[in-house]
Image: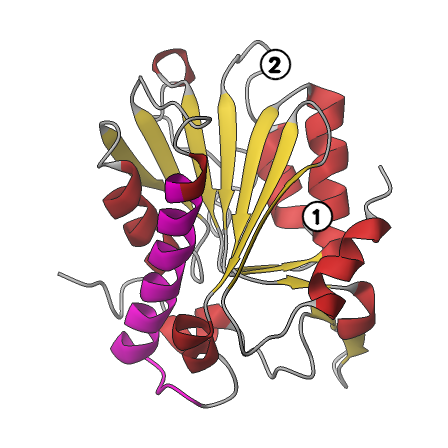
């Protein structure tokens, strides 16, 4: 699916101003962009110290994004059954907390952690019962190529008939394209909720001396690795 026309969202709006947009990509996928400089700028460069302060900054920005989406789309997002929230460690941890806070105002929620660091063949924990779940939230801090989210989508049971919500703070156009293609292949109903979209021109592949290649999102904005900034390990910092 070609979503290159969405680059205009990234390149045209004033980054210093609040911005909200809803785009119906097709009959299945809706994209909700809610940019709030007051909560987004603290995530960039070294504006916020690593650790608990950064965790809270990421959580605060995601809450703002999700809240604005619900306010604007309250007639279209109907959560009448329990919601399962799955965070992608480590950068997804604060987003999971944010999603639990916002979604719990509309429905009963249960939170889980992806097993991507420990069991890539079974990303969803056994405790997550898809037969009892109609709404699945995947929470990840930054979505670059989209491969991590697509891996999770591929492991959702084939006969599951529910709605997927992708909650994130920053989304690359390349990742958006991959997620939309996966949704089209699997016929998922999906809401993608992000704080900022970055065009392909604002992202690039960087290869390090050790041979590892990483897709950097929002290079000019100086977006750090959310996982590294939130915590060095999953157990090191968990909020009360």
Q: Earlier in the sequence, mark 1 or mark 2?
A: 2
Magenta highlight on residue 67: yes
Magenta highlight on residue 70: yes
- At horizontal 27% and vertical 63% (from top left) the residue drawn is 235
Q: Which residues are magenta?
A: 47-71
The N terminus - image quarter: top right
- At horizontal 37% and vertical 26% (from top left) the residue drawn is 126
Viewer-nearest residue: 226 or 21: 21
Where does the image place residue 143, in percent across and percent down from the top left? 61, 57
Q: Give residue 103's mark.
A: none
- At horizontal 34% and vertical 59% (from top left) the residue drawn is 94
Where does the image place residue 190, in percent across and percent down from the top left? 57, 30
Task: Answer left or right for 238 relative to 132.
Answer: left
6 is higher (above) or lower (below) than 131: below
Where does the image place residue 65, in percent across and percent down from the top left? 43, 55
Task: Answer left or right for 118 relative to 2.
Answer: left
Q: Residue furthest bottom?
A: 46
143 is higher (above) or lower (below) than 226: above
Q: Disc 1 vs disc 2: which is toward the camera? A: 1
Q: Which residue is mark 2?
A: 158
Viewer-nearest residue: 50 or 81: 81
Where does the image place residue 182, in percent across and percent down from the top left? 72, 32
The C terminus - image quarter: bottom left
Magenta segment's dominant SS is helix
Q: Which residue is mark 1?
A: 176
Secondary structure under tag 1 reads helix
Q: CA distance from mark 1 to mark 2?
A: 22 Å
Secondary structure under tag 2 reads loop
Residue 114 appears in the picture as rendered = no
Task: Answer left or right for 147 relative to 161.
Answer: right
- At horizontal 37% and vertical 42% (from top left) the residue drawn is 71
């Amino acid at each position: 699916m070609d979503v290159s026309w969405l680059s205009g969202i990234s390149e045209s709006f004033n980054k210093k101003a609040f911005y909200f947009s809803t785009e119906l990509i097709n009959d299945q996928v809706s994209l909700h962009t809610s940019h709030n400089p007051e909560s987004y700028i603290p995530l960039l460069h070294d504006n916020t110290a690593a650790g608990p302060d950064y965790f809270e900054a990421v959580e605060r920005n995601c809450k703002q994004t999700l809240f604005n989406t619900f306010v604007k789309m309250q007639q279209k997002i109907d959560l009448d059954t329990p919601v399962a929230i799955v965070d992608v460690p480590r950068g997804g941890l604060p987003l999971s907390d944010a999603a639990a806070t916002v979604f719990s105002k509309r429905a009963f929620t249960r939170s889980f952690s992806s097993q991507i660091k420990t069991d890539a063949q079974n990303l969803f924990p056994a405790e997550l019962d898809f037969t009892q779940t109609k709404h699945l939230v995947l929470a990840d801090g930054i979505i670059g190529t989209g491969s991590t989210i697509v891996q999770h989508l591929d492991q959702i049971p084939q006969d599951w008939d529910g709605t997927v919500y992708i909650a994130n703070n920053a989304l690359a156009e390349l990742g958006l394209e991959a997620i939309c293609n996966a949704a089209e292949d699997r016929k998922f109903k999906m809401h993608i909720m992000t704080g900022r979209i970055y065009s392909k021109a604002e992202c690039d592949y960087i290869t390090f001396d050790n041979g590892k290649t990483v897709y950097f999102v929002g290079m000019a904005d100086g977006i750090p690795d959310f996982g590294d900034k939130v915590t060095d390990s999953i157990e090191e910092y968990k909020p009360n």
